[in-house]
Image (spheres, grey):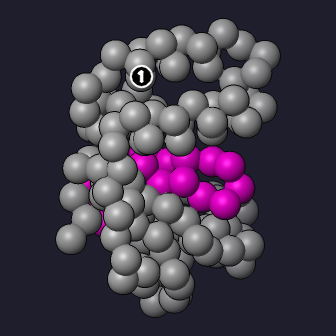
């Protein structure tokens, strides 16, 4: 059983902080079509690593009042299927995954923000504390 919140590592070198299964199981039609969930790795707040084996569309979400149907992407609800094998990361392995992501991600390169986040993460003692810096 996944303990939320989780940090999701997608194949496109992005990471998303997700607070519950409902938010995890929603994505845009475009992202779903591009395989957003394929091989996604989730690390829960207890350090367990889950890998998404397959995602299946189960429905569409309605447009929300006040949001333009011309600018808002159509959203899907999906069901996630995970590999049976679940592993456990150490806090240092988890931090290393994040450090690698920060160094790869072009948004952090031109700013000192990436180094600042790395410094904060260095002193975090739990998975949940680390995740809080990436919210």
Q: Is residue 79 visible?
A: no
Above-or-below relation of 66 to 56? above
Q: Residues within 10 Å of mark 1 (few under 14, many from 20)?
A: many
Residue at figure coordinates x 72%, y 35% from the top left: 105
Q: Is residue 74 magenta?
A: no
**Dividing the picture into quarters, in which one does residue 31 lie?**
bottom right
Q: Is residue 21 left or right of residue 39?
A: left
- Secondary structure under badge 1? helix
- Which quadrant of the figure contains the N terminus? bottom left
Residue at figure coordinates x 45%, y 34% from the top left: 95
Residue at figure coordinates x 68%, y 74% from the top left: 35
User: Closest to the observer: 20 or 8?
Assistant: 8
Residue at figure coordinates x 68%, y 49% from the top left: 13
Q: Is residue 10 magenta?
A: yes
**Dividing the picture into quarters, in which one does residue 48 lie?**
bottom left
Above-or-below relation of 3 to 53? above
Q: Is residue 88 left or right of residue 35?
A: left
Residue 9, position as x, y percentages in the image: 54, 54
Q: Is residue 21 visible?
A: yes
- Residue stretch rendered in magenta on the structure: 4-21
Residue 40, position as x, y percentages in the image: 55, 65
Q: Is residue 8 left or right of residue 47?
A: right
Above-or-below relation of 32 to 24? below
- Which quadrant of the figure contains the C terminus? top left
User: Closest to the observer: 117 or 47?
Assistant: 47
Residue 21, position as x, y percentages in the image: 31, 66
Residue holding disc 1: 121
């Amino acid at each position: 059983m996944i303990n939320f919140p989780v940090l999701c590592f997608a194949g496109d070198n992005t990471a998303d902080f997700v607070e519950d299964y409902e938010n995890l199981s929603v994505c845009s039609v475009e992202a779903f079509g591009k395989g957003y969930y394929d091989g996604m790795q989730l690390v829960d707040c207890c350090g367990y690593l889950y890998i998404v084996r397959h995602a299946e569309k189960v429905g569409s979400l309605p447009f929300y009042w006040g949001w333009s149907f011309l600018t808002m992407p159509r959203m899907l609800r999906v069901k996630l299927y995970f590999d049976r094998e679940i592993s456990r990361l150490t806090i240092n392995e988890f931090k290393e995954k994040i450090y690698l992501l920060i160094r790869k991600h072009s948004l952090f390169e031109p700013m000192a923000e990436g180094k600042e986040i790395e410094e904060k993460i260095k002193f975090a003692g739990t998975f949940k504390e680390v995740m809080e810096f990436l919210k």
